[in-house]
Image: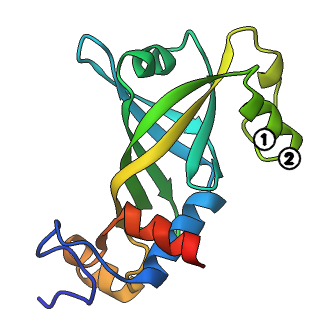
Amino acid sequence: MTTPPNSTAQNPSTPTADPSLQRKIMRTLAKKSFCTLATTSPAGRSHSAGVVYEMVNSTMWIHASSTSRKARSIVQNPHVGVCVPFRRLPVGPPYTIHFQGTAAIVPMDSPVVAELLAAGKLTSTSGHGALEMPTGCFITIEPRGSIHSFGPGARVIDIIRDPLGSGARTFSLDAALQNEVNR
């Protein structure tokens, strides 16, 4: 078995340095709108929930109830995991982009929220009565460390031939954000 270029299957701790892949993944995060958000309660119990999100620059924004399990857990422990699944092919496993991040609760009456709403940046997450919700809040997530993915940047034929060894990629998030700033 040959390892395709930029694959991390042999050494998953080696970051991929391909700036075009980094841009592709960052653009994909900005285009998509659904992810799973994993939190941990103060008692150490994990919780995962499907949520709708919007990216504003490099920050993920999610609307929630301040009384929800995810919001209560974030208040106690801001370390979260995020997985964005999406289909590229009608068969096989979905592609994924996943990372760890630091979350924070932002009140609905925050000036930052008002500014983003006025600029039309939170339209997907603020619809369906979300802004009138008495316990509503936003959760922001700043990705940290590395972004891992399965699928993006790999050739489809390589994934079909060797799904375990060809589709995984990892890169330093700091490098990706720096590339976006320099564009």
Of 26 and 33, nearer the camera is: 26
Of 180 and 128, nearer the camera is: 180
Q: State left or right for residue 7 relative to residue 98.
A: left
Q: In which quadrant of the rendered image does the C terminus lie?
A: bottom right
Q: State left or right for residue 42 relative to residue 85.
A: left
| Image coords of residue 76 (percent x, y) | 37, 15
Q: Hey, what amino acid is under mark 2?
A: Ala
Tell me, yes or no, whether the two marked residues, 1 and 2, touch with CB atoms within 8 Å: yes
Dot 2 crowding, Cα within 10 Å, few <14, some 14–19, many 20+: few
From the image, tell me which residue sits under label 1: 116
| Looking at the image, residue 87 lies above or below residue 130 | below
| Image coords of residue 173 (percent x, y) | 39, 62
Q: In which quadrant of the rendered image does the N terminus lie?
A: bottom left
Q: State left or right for residue 37 relative to residue 60.
A: left
Kind of element beneath mark 2: loop
Res. 91 visible in picture = no
Of 61 and 125, nearer the camera is: 61
User: Residue visible at 35% across and 66% down?
Assistant: 150
